[in-house]
Image: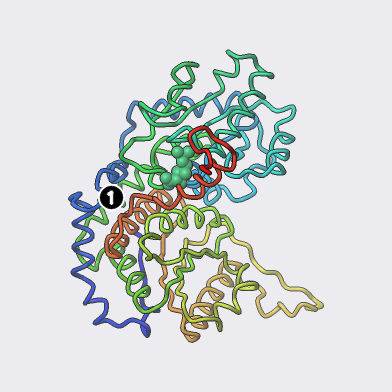
Amino acid sequence: MIQVDISNVWGPISLPDLLGIEKEVFEAHRTLAEGTGEGAEYRGWLDLPTRGPSPEITRIQKAAEKIRAESDVCVVVGIGGSYLGSRAAIELLQGPNRNIGRAKGDPQIFFAGNSLSTRHWNELTGLLEGKDFDLIVISKSGTTTEPAIAFRGLRWMLERRYGTDGAGSRIYAITDPCSGALRQMATEKGWESFVIPPAAGGRFSVLTAVGLLPMAVAGIDIMQVLCGAMDAKESYDMYSFENPVWLYAAVRNLMYRKGKTIELFESFEPGFRAFGLWWQQLFGESEGKDGKGLFPATAELTADLHSLGQLIQQGQRNLFETMVRFDAPDKKMTIMGDVQNLDGLNYLEGKTLDFVDEQAYLGTVAAHCDGGVPVITMDCGELTARTVGELFYFLELSCGISAYILGVNPFNQPGVELYKRNMFELLGKPGYEIKN
Ligand code: PA5
């Protein structure tokens, strides 16, 4: 079970504050579980965890085996909720440099269609030269501009290299079961396809094929991810402050009410950066509406202590931090002695790197608390595929409850459409002409 330690939050909030919000947390949890709140039709993600493989999961595993065997590179095309979850899991479990040295049998994984950058496109197409590759295209609507443009370009590359039929056998579409442009294309072209359940919005879709197929291609045991999520579903179905989900949802709302309107979500693992981006979308898009919402910021420690540390310690007092911790790995790095000791490190001789990391964590928490920045610690235990599944579900559940406490619909994103309308007008998209 993930442990949420709130011993470093007192000051801006008090125990009576926590006890005072208990009824709201209870109501929010019940609203989510019973489907009596706004957006209730998008709670399908609550029931995605499973302990046994469904036919869809077996197909995902088979498709992943085929991609792993035939390709040097798998390109995952998607944006927002359609790619952040798989990237989060892959980088957390396998490291940000996992692609180096990989090829057929255990392919590299690149993400595309998440920007409109020509430089990024040129880099990607350069990396694909001379390599066998497959495409996983993920879009619920099928018409999101960034992935649609990238998919069109990559599809043509595939067709030029392998012919129409050969290309078709290397395309995997993940989309709505019935409607949308991508579903229509997949059906007409006969591509293998998987389903994004209509009841699971993009940012809540990581435990569907959206997250699971790229993870399986990376060699992650997706049944372990799903079992971890199932552990979470069972463990966190608890209506009291013994539930760490309650503690997290309650404390972040109390912080917000006390003017701590920025949450810095952090870990001491460099591989956690992408996970932070997934969390950022989950909470930002779910809560940031109706003039409300915590700003979800992320940082990597200790690296960012050397860039953001000054601001955290002494800047505007509108921050609190959530630090996500994992057990240190079994394989240790021990600091050696040096006869000259010019770097002055001999006092650490024989100590392990994770011992130093632990002291850095403790020292940082103490300093930030002294500086008026409260810290929530989430202790996740061993870093495994199962833990990652548990963490995904833990945070999704926390998000649903937290948003209902805040008084917003967690499952819509009306504001995202406005920039698209302007862009489509400027691009002259049919149906979006500028009216004089
Ligand atoms: O959470 C969301 O709804 C968004 O981030 C979408 O996932 C994102 O905009 C991509 O949309 P689509 O899957 O329709 O291409």
Question: Is 177 drawn above or below residue 285 in the view shown?
Answer: above
Q: Position of residue 356 (x, y in %)?
A: 59, 72
Tag 1 secondary structure: helix
Ligand 1, seen in the image, is in the quarter at top left
Q: Which residue shows up at 71% across the image and 78% down it?
A: 346
Q: Which residue is mark 1?
A: 233
Determine whether, in the image, residue 37 is placed left or right of residue 390: left
Based on the displayed image, in which of its 4 quarters is residue 218 positioned? top right
Question: Is 203 drawn above or below residue 358 in the view shown?
Answer: above
Q: Residue furthest front?
A: 436
Q: In terms of depth relative to the viewer, which is nearer, 219 or 176?
A: 176
Disc 1 crowd, CA 10 A, few/some/many (<14, 14-19, 20+): many
Q: Which residue shows up at 69% across the image and 19% down it?
A: 161
Residue 113 visible in the picture: yes
Determine whether, in the image, residue 341 is placed left or right of residue 34: right
Q: Position of residue 34 (x, y in %)?
A: 17, 50
Q: Position of residue 180 (x, y in %)?
A: 42, 29
Quadrant showing the N terminus? bottom left
Which kind of residue does numbered mark 1 sit on?
Lys
Q: In terms of depth relative to the viewer, which is nearer, 333 or 82?
A: 82
Colour theme = rainbow
Q: Which residue shows up at 46% across the image and 27% down it?
A: 181
Q: Position of residue 37 (x, y in %)?
A: 22, 53
Q: In terms of depth relative to the viewer, which is nearer, 393 or 112?
A: 112
Residue 211 visible in the picture: no
Q: In terms of depth relative to the viewer, which is nearer, 119 or 109?
A: 119
The number of numbered discs placed on residues in the rendered structure image is 1
Based on the displayed image, in which of its 4 quarters is residue 310 positioned? bottom right
Disc 1 residue lies near ligand 1 with CB under 8 A? no
